[in-house]
Image (tube, rainbow, N blue to C red):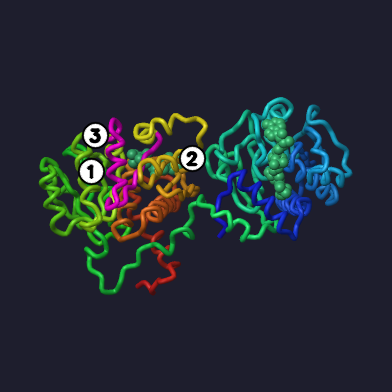
Amino acid sequence: MRLELLSPMEMAAVDRRAIADGPFDGLALMRRAGTLVAAEVLVRYPGAAKVHVLAGPGNNGGDGYVIAGLLAESGFAVSLWTSGMPRPGSDAALAAAQCRLERLSLLEFTAGPDELVVDALYGSGLSRPVDGDAARAIALVESLDLPVVAVDLPSGVSGDSGQVSGSAFRAAVTVTFARKKPGHLLLPGRELCGEVVLADIGIDDAVIGEMNIRIFENDPALWRTALPVAQVDTHKYRRGHVGAFSGGPSSTGAARLSALAAARAGAGAVTVLSPANAMQVNAAHLTSIMLRKVSDAHDLAKVQANHPPSAFVLGPGFGIGEKARAFALDILGDGRSNGVEGLVLDADGITSFRDEPSTLFAAAGLEAAPALVLTPHEGEFGRLFPDIAGDETLSKLDKARRAASLSHGTVIYKGADTVIASPEGRAAINANGVPWLATAGSGDVLAGIVAGLLAQGMPAFEAACAAVWMHAEAARRFRPGLIADDLPAALVPVLHELRGQHPKARPQG
Ligand SMILES: NC(=O)C1=CN([C@@H]2O[C@H](COP(=O)(O)OP(=O)(O)OC[C@H]3O[C@@H](n4cnc5c(N)ncnc54)[C@H](O)[C@@H]3O)[C@@H](O)[C@H]2O)[C@@H](O)CC1
Ligand SMILES: Nc1ncnc2c1ncn2[C@@H]1O[C@H](COP(=O)(O)OP(=O)(O)O)[C@@H](O)[C@H]1O
Ligand SMILES: [K+]
């Protein structure tokens, strides 16, 4: 699958390289791009009363000239509205020269009901805010509620960040070329793109392969082969043991949600690690999940001495303060020598380090430290990484990557467009989320899934990507009405399906 995401700059480099290598020159690529967009229009809007093609001054406009010509040849009534002449000698100028249609000035743009708009104003070359005639055209199209087919990106949407610069079209369909860009998946870009169609214009995969791209759309193809597969001769502790720290007597539910999720994600044993004063309430609500008293460092040391968990979840409902810091630093310091694969630090666990994040980052950076996975939502992200969060020049993708590098941890920067980033620079943007996942406790479940996968030996980045995708997929299939309590069981069919696709899959009874 073509999951790499190319920044507009990388895409331009790929275009140049592909043109240099042949067999297609720039105009041929443009003709292929335009032909594929025109084909989408034909298939989706065969009855459009009229098609307005808006062509800008660059190569995005060049695609527009090709599209306008082809749609007119196919029998559509086409109005071609242009903004700025293509640079003489450019591919766009060649495409414009081959288009016989009358040029109307975008300044005079007008349209009527039941008509269609093809937006070929600006694509990956967007270099300043969209204003003036283009902004007026966008407003008119919006007021008439006309369907828009965007070429490469809706004009005004940054391919790097998904942010709007000035104003932007809201497309029903966006046809992009070779690979998606981060702006197709990051909000608000994802919303403004509508359905994204990836069109193959003939750029060889090898050209993209040479770029060593490390940013991907999150998809099972990225991590399916790393999913844990239980061996025939396994036993419960070998299938991974998760320890989920509980808060005090009035905030124990979050840890139990994490614990259940870890168990459903395949951990063979899960133990809620509870302060003494919450033992009773936890005991009253647990069956297959085990329970141990962990009130202080001494108790934690005892847990680590006998069947120690291979992964921990610390934070959900835990309470903010010194105890969370001490436990987290203890686990990171105890390290892989004791069989600990990872620590998932969520919610209060993250906030506990707001005044001294560097101690956490230093502990995670030690050679023998287990993997640290941080799962902040936007508010928590700002507490742990205030400088990165406050830098408005950075996209959500950039922010997650910088945070991962700084913290030596894998960062799951949550939200409707969750970004997962590894400390070594890999990143994935998740796109299968559904709004009803925004329900109290759903983050606790996510933390538990990550820990469940880590405990079974899945590498941190893959475990984080898999957990985010499965969490969202379980919610998507469940449909609205979901509460966090439903999620652990809703994971089961998703896991079954993924395991069925695993290359080492055995028949399941
Ligand atoms: N050979 C190639 O390089 C190919 C390029 N393709 C198309 O080329 C596009 C990229 O082309 P370009 O790099 O020329 O970039 P664009 O055509 O996206 O935009 C660049 C042009 O628009 C102007 N511009 C940018 N933002 C503006 C704003 N807000 N207001 C007014 N003017 C603005 C710039 O000054 C420049 O003239 C892609 O999006 C894709 O549609 C496709 O044809 C496939 C092949
Ligand atoms: N609009 C949305 N669309 C899809 N997923 C969302 C949306 N809003 C939040 N989420 C997801 O829901 C989960 C909420 O986690 P979190 O904010 O920690 O909530 P809680 O602390 O209540 O568990 C995260 O996985 C997040 O990515
Ligand atoms: K466009």
In the rendered image, which quarter is residue 150 located in? Answer: top right
Which amino acid type is marked by label 2? Asp
| In this picture, residue 232 sits left or right of residue 174 | left
Classify the position of ligand 2 by quadrant: top left, top right, bottom left or bottom right: top left
User: Distance between the Cα atoms at labels 1 and 3?
Assistant: 14 Å
**Residue ID for mark 1:** 329
Most foreground residue, 183 or 372: 372
User: Distance between the Cα atoms at labels 2 and 3?
Assistant: 28 Å
* Callout 1: CB less than 8 Å from ligand 2: no
The secondary element bearing badge 1 is classed as helix
In the rendered image, which quarter is residue 504 located in? Answer: bottom left
Q: Residue at x 35, y 46 (%)?
A: 409
Which amino acid type is marked by label 1? Leu
**Residue ID for mark 3:** 320
Place of residue 158 in the rendered image (x, y in percent of width and height, measured from the top left) = 60, 37
* Callout 3: CB less than 8 Å from ligand 2: no
Which amino acid type is marked by label 3? Ile
Q: Which residues are magenta?
A: 353-378
Q: Residue at x 43, y 47 (%)?
A: 420
Sequence-wise first label, 1 or 2: 1
156 w.r.t. 194: above or below = above
Q: What's the mark number on residue 398?
A: 2
